[in-house]
């Protein structure tokens, strides 16, 4: 599996992931106190949907392309508006050419007191990310393995915020690494919110991941999944998932409104499904 951001920018998985990200940040903005978002695998920040990578796959057309063209139910439209505004801020005249990755979705929403820490290990991607945030005093761009941040950069000085973990799944063992990193991070900062994205290709991998998370004993783990088609043989990407630890109390109900619409809109031949459940509830 290889899910480097540039090739899949704006696809169905990005749509779901970034809507959830925007809803978490929207909730944090309800309080005046500053917060920090730590993006451990940030990518380059901004993607040209007609460029070589995203243009080659064209996955965005069945993802953000469908969403931008859709007439959404009023409540769904209200909940996805912060995400759509972040996209529109990178484009002119309602045309869709550039897609903001998670660092720019985050940055669009931050208030003056909030901060972004974006980490990227890939050398070329890091340079592009740094260029996209040149001169931005609210964003700290660091050339670092995102997994290292789970120990050395927690808790942030604000002691309030979100850690977004969105690895490219270029190496084997990423599911196990996510569990290990969460255990390490949670010991240092049990009050933080953590959002872990994962691809759904072989459902058995996702189920094994959920069982491993349950075994950690960490409370308040919400699972959000959306699939656009049934599993296939050989396995191919057919779904997207997000684990949210210490989620905003409104997130579950918000996703019960949003995910049914996305499952219909983004799926193949109306075969989309979604799941919202708790791997572990309150302690």
Image (cartoon, helix red, strand yellow):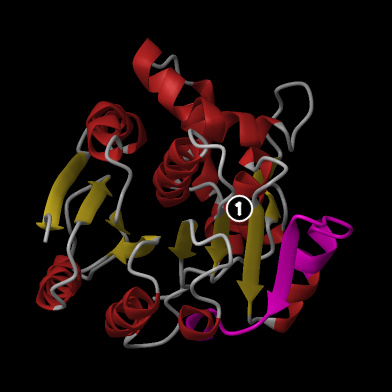
Image quarter where the N terminus lies is bottom left
Nearer to us in this view, 118 or 239: 118
Name the image quarter holding the C terminus: bottom left
Q: Residue at x 44, y 14 (%)?
A: 71
199 in magenta: no
* SS of the residue under disc 1: loop
Residue at image mark 1:
101
| Residue under the point 33% across and 33% down | 262
Magenta stretch in the rendered image: 128-148
The stretch drawn in magenta includes residue 143 = yes
Q: Quadrant of residue 77?
A: top left
Q: For this view, does 277 lie left or right of residue 236? A: left
Asked whether residue 282 is in view, the answer is: yes
Q: Is 130 on the left or on the right of 45, as rendered?
A: right
From the top left corner, tell me how far across and down residue 93 is, in percent.
Answer: 77, 21
Q: Assess disc 1: are there few (<14), some (14-19) or many (≥20) residues with their C-alpha within 10 Å of its C-alpha.
A: many
């Amino acid at each position: 599996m290889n899910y480097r951001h540039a090739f899949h920018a704006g696809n169905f998985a990005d749509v779901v992931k970034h809507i959830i990200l925007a809803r978490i940040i929207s909730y944090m903005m309800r309080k005046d106190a500053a917060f920090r978002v730590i993006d451990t695998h940030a990518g380059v920040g901004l993607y040209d949907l007609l460029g070589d990578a995203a243009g080659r796959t064209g996955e965005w057309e069945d993802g953000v392309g469908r969403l931008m063209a859709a007439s959404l139910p009023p409540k769904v439209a209200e909940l996805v508006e912060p995400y759509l505004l972040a996209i529109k801020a990178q484009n002119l005249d309602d045309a869709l050419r550039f897609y903001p990755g998670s660092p720019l979705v985050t940055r669009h929403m931050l208030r003056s007191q909030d901060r972004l820490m974006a980490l990227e290990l890939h050398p070329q991607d890091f340079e592009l990310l740094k260029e996209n945030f040149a001169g931005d005093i609210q964003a700290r761009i660091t050339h670092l393995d995102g997994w290292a941040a789970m120990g050395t950069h927690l808790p942030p000085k604000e002691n309030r915020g979100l850690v977004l973990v969105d690895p490219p799944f270029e190496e084997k063992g990423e599911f196990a690494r996510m569990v290990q990193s969460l255990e390490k991070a949670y010991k240092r900062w049990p009050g933080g919110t953590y959002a872990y994205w994962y691809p759904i290709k072989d459902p058995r991998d996702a189920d094994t991941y959920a069982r491993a998370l349950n075994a950690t004993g960490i409370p308040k783990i919400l699972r959000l999944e959306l699939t656009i088609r049934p599993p296939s043989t050989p396995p191919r990407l057919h779904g997207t998932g997000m684990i949210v630890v210490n989620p905003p109390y409104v997130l579950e109900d918000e996703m019960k409104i949003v995910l049914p619409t996305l499952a219909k809109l983004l799926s193949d031949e109306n075969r989309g499904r979604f799941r919202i459940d708790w791997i572990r509830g309150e302690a």
